[in-house]
Amino acid sequence: MKNFNEMEQELLRSGKADKVKAIADSPDGQKLMQKLDAGKIERAVQSGDSDALRSVLMDVLRTGEGQRLAKQLEQTMREK
């Protein structure tokens, strides 16, 4: 799996970083951020605990906001 810095650089090179930021800043993104446990995510990232990160992602995708954001991100990433 690519590390987050590499993914960030790839988004910047492709010109999609602003689109991804706009999706994160959307009303759905803001609602979702309020529901997330930032400390849990940070600990999982720092420790490299992929199972914990997968669990958080699955929790996100069980919400309406998460499903809409995932669809928007998928469409953005497919754009040329």
Image: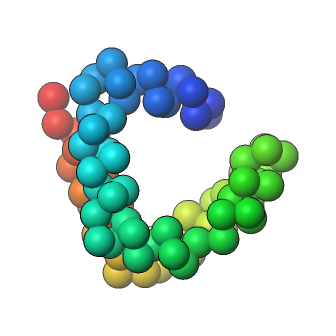
Residue 48 vertical position relative to residue 16 in the rendered view, above or below: below
Residue 3 vertical position relative to residue 59 in the rendered view, above or below: above
What residue appears at the point 49 percent right and 30 percent down from the top-left corner?
7
User: From the image, which quarter does the N terminus lie in?
Assistant: top right
Name the side, left or right, on which 16 lies relative to 48: left
**Residue 17: percent from left, percent from top:** 32, 35
What residue appears at the point 74 percent right and 64 percent down from the top-left corner?
40
Query: For this rendering, which residue is in front, 8 or 30?
Result: 30
Q: Is residue 65 visible?
A: yes
Question: Based on the displayed image, in which of its 4 quarters is residue 78 positioned?
Answer: top left
Residue 13 vertical position relative to residue 49 in the rendered view, above or below: above
Name the side, left or right, on which 43 lies relative to 36: right
Q: How is the image coloured?
A: rainbow
Residue 13 vertical position relative to residue 62 in the rendered view, above or below: above
**Residue 4: percent from left, percent from top:** 58, 34
**Residue 12: percent from left, percent from top:** 35, 24
